[in-house]
Image (cartoon, rainbow, N blue to C red):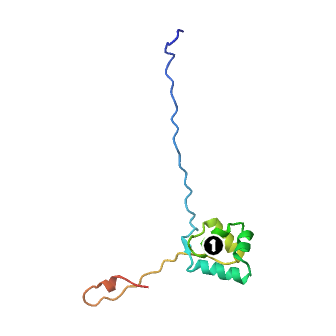
Amino acid sequence: MNYGEKLGEVEIPVMKKVVVSTPKKETEKETFFVDNYGKLIVETRGKKKLTREEFAKKINEKVSVIKRVESEEMEPDDVLTEKIERFLEIKLKKPYEEKPIGKKQIKGDLTLGDVVEIE
């Protein structure tokens, strides 16, 4: 064997990135925050006679985060939502419910009012 002599072919394995996603459970439903969730937190915290600082300390969160959630500048993530709900014994989220649209009887020409339903 001499210097610079070719030894043979070397095969370099190619690494493939595999993305594994966890499918949603069938029992998991789409949820959304109740109206005025910030006001609900403030009122419930007030009933328990806790200041914002005391409340933040009890659930191990920053006061600034609690302030932003109470003023509805920020929606809490799932972990924070669970902490708040458990401590204050309230529900901040409710499941999305589909409502069937009733059929209207159309007399004459079709108008925009026949198609759009305003709640």
The quadrant in which residue 51 appears is bottom right
- Asked if residue 81 can be seen in this view, the reply is no
The quadrant in which residue 78 appears is bottom right
Residue located at (25% from left, 89% from top): 108
Residue located at (72% from left, 73% from top): 55
Residue located at (52% from left, 44% from top): 17
Residue located at (58% from left, 68% from top): 28
Under circle 1, the secondary element is: helix
Q: Which residue is mark 1?
A: 67
In this picture, residue 93 sits left or right of residue 98: right
Q: Amino acid at mark 1?
A: Lys
Q: Is residue 18 above or below residue 36?
A: above
22 and 88: which one is in front? Answer: 88
49 and 10: which one is in front? Answer: 49
For label 1, the crowd category at 10 Å Cα-Cα, with few meaning under 14, some 14 to 19 and many 20 or more, is some
14 and 28: which one is in front? Answer: 14
- Asked if residue 65 can be seen in this view, the reply is yes
Q: Is residue 89 above or below residue 12?
A: below
Can you say which quadrant of the picture contains the C terminus?
bottom left
The percent position of residue 88, horizontal first and vertical second, equals 70, 77
Can you say which quadrant of the picture contains the N terminus?
top right
